[in-house]
Image (cartoon, rainbow, N blue to C red):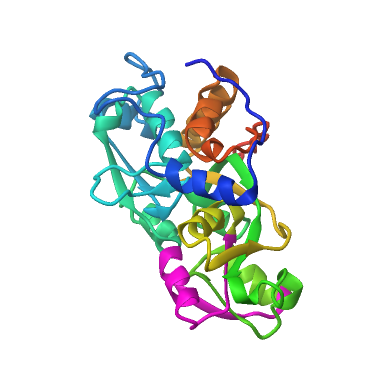
Amino acid sequence: MQFKRRKAKAAIGAMALALVLSACGGGSGTEGESDYPIADSPEFPSGSTPAKLAESGKITIGVKFDQPGLGFMPPGEDTPVGLDIEMGKIIAGQLGISPSDIQWKETVSDNREPFLQNEAVDIVIASYSITDERQQVVGQAGPYYVTGQQLLVREEDKESITGPDDLEGVKVCSVTGSTSIQTVTEEYGAEPVPFDTYSACVRQLQNGTVDAVTTDGAILLGYAAQSPDELEVVGPVFSEERYGVGYYKGDSQMCTFLTDTINQSFENGSWADAFEATLGESGIETPEPPKTDPCPQG
């Protein structure tokens, strides 16, 4: 595929609307086909996880189902769409696995580590911010995307809640186990109200149970666009979230494969194509790819 960089060309409202619309599309072709290279008889060290996956011809990937533009299951469909989904297809392709042989397992923030530890999934690609705490129990390769945390509030509250400094004692919802809810609680004194999904948080905001929802800005824009007269994204970006691919801790050969594949996608344009087909549909400029972390030694 030929990639074209596009400049930002819309106001925030239009960008948000386009982001929601992008959740209904993606970079994949028809079922069983892929817009990304699929390796022909790839070779890996004998007995390694990549070798076992390639031999089986199947992979189970944990992803979100409720994040427009990143990992979202459109109503009535059976395949999620978004940047995380496209990254899953890119990784599977380098194992010789086509999209039709990927099992997408819904994964919420609080069960990402247990899913990896219990081997319920092979990898997790679910807006999974790389942190030192998480790397104590799982492996994380990447990052493949860097974003930042913002706030979603009701339209009538946009003058009183303008950023994180206004959160002292405010009821703020984010998902259980996320870095977002930890940040607003520990650094800004918010009263945390955790739920399993972001869509549940948005419902709590709409019915007045909480006064703000926090997570990465790209996700919040999608929800704001669904209720443009009711909800608004406010304030500056106040954190850095480095999305990585989760894998079973200590699997050095898997880390090497994932890191090499992510870097290859940066170099051959498939990452840019994936971004263009998902978050890029909002009209924002495709960013420069981030620099990946080295795999742990030993």
Task: Classify residue 94 by image quadrant.
Answer: top left
- Residue 81, position as x, y percentages in the image: 38, 41
Give the quarter of the figure containing the C terminus. Answer: top right
- Name which quarter of the figure residue 289 lies in: top right
Q: How many marks can you see?
A: 0
Q: Is residue 71 above or below residue 203?
A: above
**Is residue 130 in sight in this rendering?**
no
Question: Which picture quadrant has residue 295?
Answer: top right
Farthest front residue?
229
Please name the residue shown 63% across and 38% down the image: 284
Looking at this rendering, what residue extends furthest in the bottom direction?
169
Q: Residue 125 location, x and y as percent?
A: 45, 45
Asked if the magenta segment contains residue 223, the reply would be no
The residue segment tinted magenta is 188-215
Relative depth, front residue between 13 and 275: 13
Q: Residue 145 placed where, x, y %?
A: 59, 41
Q: Where residue 133 appears, x then y in whole percent?
A: 60, 60
Furthest-right residue in this view: 165
- Please say if 28 is above or below 135: above
Q: Nearer the viewer, residue 65 or 49?
A: 65
Q: Is 189 one of the magenta-colored residues?
A: yes
The foreground one among 142 and 285 is 285
Taking the spot 65% from the left edge, 34% from the top edge, the residue there is 285
The answer to whether residue 59 shows anywhere in this view is yes
